[in-house]
Amino acid sequence: MDALDLAHQLVRELYPDARAAWLGGSVARGDASSTSDLDITVLLDGPPAPMRKSLEHAGWPVELFVHTEKSLRYFADKDQDRRQPTMMRLVGESVVLLDTDGCGARLQQEYLAEVAAGPKPLSVDELDLLRYTITNLIDDLSDASGDVRLAIASVLWQDAARLLLTGAGRWSGTGKGLLREVAAYDGAQAAALMDGVRAEDDRLIVAVDHILADYGGRLFAGFELAAKL
């Protein structure tokens, strides 16, 4: 039995009253690895409360995301706020496993359209805070070595990548998802950042300064951010 059939079987067994279900993630994209899991989102009318559940089924690790329409919208809005479209992609970029009343196809198209539209632009305060944070990390990296340098570099490339992506109206991510987003947007920049993380010289600083240049460069003197109480 293939992954699609297994996912459909699991939904039928665990959630016989489900309105819809979608198989997302790497299996749906077609780039699954030997350690990939089945990312299944299930839509219910009501209880149980929205939940995330991990299990194994027929040799596959499975991540279940159980929602109502209201909770799907709640988490999609949180995706928008953090500019990381996790929930929207799980539903939008998916294979429909179950659709009892048309909501499976409808919500898939709605969230796919939101993914395609991209995130809201950075505000002035958000941009300044990113530039300021990156500037401080560059300063810390300049005289660091060994494990300390590696720890700083691992944070710096991610903040720089988020600036590169969100500044260009692209979605961000975390971990390997962030690297995938950068590589899809600008493979040369992704390679330069990763090369800089591995290097023991100033290559990462050069790569980050190249990204900062499009947004006013480094920022320290004159930076202000009002507290939100």
Image: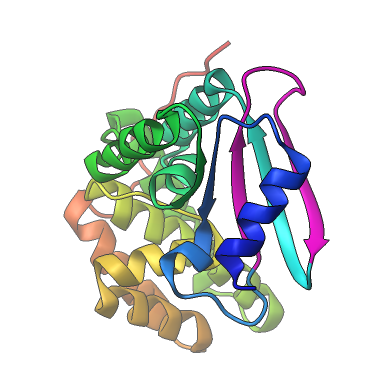
- Left/right placement of residue 227 relative to residue 63 reads left
Q: Nearer the viewer, residue 15 or 154?
A: 15
Q: Quadrant of the C terminus?
A: top right
Closer to the camera, 25 or 224? 25
The answer to if 29 sits in the magenta stretch is no
**Horizontal side of residue 217 vs 77, given as left or right:** left
Whether residue 139 is visible to the viewer of this picture, yes or no, is no
Residue at x 45%, y 56% (from the top left corner): 159
Dominant secondary structure, magenta: strand
Horizontal side of 208 relative to 24 (left or right) equals left
* Residue at position x 56%, y 63% in the image: 4
Q: Is residue 163 above or below residue 193?
A: above
Quadrant in the picture for the N terminus: bottom right
Q: Nearer the viewer, residue 9 or 62?
A: 9
Query: What is the magenta range?
Result: 37-57
Residue 178 drawn at (x, y percent): 46, 61
| Residue lying furthest left | 214
Residue 94 shows in this picture: yes
Q: Based on the picture, tell me whether residue 49 belongs to the magenta stretch.
A: yes
Task: Establish if 186 lies above or below 165.
Answer: below
Q: Position of residue 201 (x, y in %)?
A: 45, 87
Q: Is residue 61 above or below residue 32?
A: above
